[in-house]
Structures are given as structure tokens and as C-alpha cells.
Image (cartoon, rainbow, N blue to C red):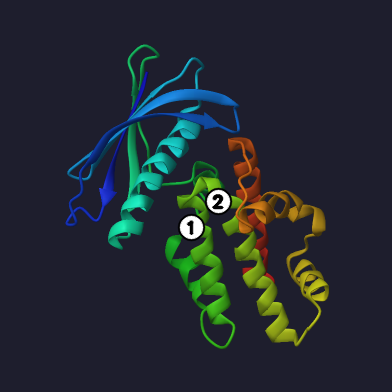
Amino acid sequence: MYIIKGIVHPERAQISLGPIDFEIFHPVTSQSAKTNINIALNQDTVIVWADVEWDIFDIRNVAKQLVADQLAMVGYIKGYAYEVEIRQILNTEKQIDYVYGIDMPCIGERNNGKDLNTEVLKIMSHWSGENGIFFRHCLNDLIMAMKHPDDSAFYCFRALESLKHICRVRFNIDSESEQWKKMSEITGTCKSDIDLIREKAFPARHGDVVGITDEEITSMFIKTWNIVDAFLVNA
């Protein structure tokens, strides 16, 4: 039995909901599990009874989505926009007691040692002018990709599309294929570098659901960050 604890933001808008019992199906592992969700004054608890051992980050993503799905119903009815944060997972049988950080580990490790002020100033140089809005959209989509694992591919690909639009405006390129080609020239990448992102993003952008593994998410994030970094330096 996994116990996943978190909080619903903003805390000043108090909400209590549940407990609610139901079964879930995890498309990545093809496993089913019984769950219980309870929100008490913005403190959310998700209990998962599973026959198999789940990766603690996979199950965090599942739990976060389950709570978000419940809050989507509330938002639809009340017009409220809540945010979900998952903080801790417990499983006494497996001796698991883990407190989650706020970072995406693969990005945190990749960028370890970078000076924050230096990197922010580098990014700020792209924020002004007619193309600034595209780059701001790009970075905000990358944050959304980290916040919403089920839709990571969608947001990563849309972030890259923002860079493509910079190429459209800056170089006055009408053809979409030529815009992608120009972006590849700037970043030193090729079509295959974003094939996984494109493959996973297109069903999601059309309302379909596609399972994605933690390994695929890691690979996708690294590829996306590499392309954005290259664009920052060379554009």
C-alpha cells in the first residue's frame, strides 16, 4: 500500500472532497490498482493498493493526475483553478519514506553548476523585441511540461514550435518545413532529434491519450533542453 501526500494550492481557498474510492488503469505499465482519494482542508492523500512495485516517480505522477482530475470537476462546477503539489510517499512494507523535491532530476543534474545570474541574463537578452513573446511562451511551456507529466510531450513540442515561429518572423519564412529547417540549422539538430517528442505530442494535442515511460520523459526533456540551449547561444 502506497500513501501519497500533498497539498492543494492556494490554501486560502479551502476545499474538502472525498474520500472517494475507485480503480485506475496505468497505461504505461498496463497495471490496475485500487485507489482512495481524500482532500481535507487542502491536504490531499492518495492511497494506492497495487500488486506490483511502482517507481516512486511514476506513482507520484499518477497520484498528482488523479487529484488534478478531481479538482478539474470542482473547477468545472465552481470556476476555481486549483494547483496540486505532491510532497511525500510512504510504504512501510517496502520501507519507503521519500519527500519529493521540486526539481526535474534529469534537468537538475544536467544544469548542476551553472551560475543562476549569468544564465538569467543570457535568457533576458531574448525577451525584448517582436520575438520576445515567442521565447517567453517557450519557457513557460517547459515549466508546464515539468508540472504535467501526462502532457509533457505536448508542452515540449509546443515550446519548440515557439522557436520555429521566431525563425518565421526573424527570417521572413512562410513555409513551415523551411522554418523547421532553419531552426535545425541554428541549433545544429536534425528531424530525428524531435521525433520522439513529435510522436508523443501529436495524439495529445488532438485530445488522445498516449502512455509515456519515465525513461522516455527523461530523453525527451534532455533533447528539448539541448535544442533550447543551442537556440539561446546561436540565434
Write down the residue under mark 2. Answer: 151
Q: Nearer the viewer, residue 95 or 17?
A: 17
Q: Specify whether 91 is left or right of 161.
A: left
Q: In the picture shown, does residue 209 fall above or below 52?
A: below
Q: Residues within 10 Å of mark 2 (few under 14, many from 20)?
A: many
> Pointers 1 and 2 in contact (CB under 8 A)?
yes
Q: Specify whether 115 is left or right of 81.
A: right
How far from the left and from the top, in percent, is residue 39?
A: 24, 39
Asked which secondary structure carries label 1, the reply is helix
- Three-letter residue code for mark 2: Asp
- First in sequence: mark 1 or mark 2? 1
Asked which secondary structure carries label 2, the reply is helix
Q: Nearer the viewer, residue 48 or 144?
A: 48
Looking at the image, can residue 126 be seen? no
How far from the left and from the top, in percent, is residue 172?
A: 75, 88
Residue situated furthest top in the rendering = 93
How far from the left and from the top, in percent, is residue 168?
A: 72, 81
Write down the residue under mark 1. Answer: 144
Q: Which of pointers 1 and 2 indicates the residue nearer the eye?
A: 2
Q: What is the quadrant of the N terminus in the image?
A: top left
Q: What is the quadrant of the C terminus in the image?
A: bottom right
Q: Residue at x 56, y 47 (%)?
A: 110
How far from the left and from the top, in percent, is residue 57?
A: 47, 34
Spatial CA span between label 1 and label 2: 8 Å
Q: Residue at x 63, y 43 (%)?
A: 210
Q: Residue at x 62, y 53 (%)?
A: 204
Q: In the picture shown, does residue 74 fall above or below 170?
A: above
Looking at the image, can residue 40 be seen? yes
- Three-letter residue code for mark 1: Met
Q: Residues within 10 Å of mark 1 (few under 14, many from 20)?
A: some
Residue situated furthest front in the rendering = 77
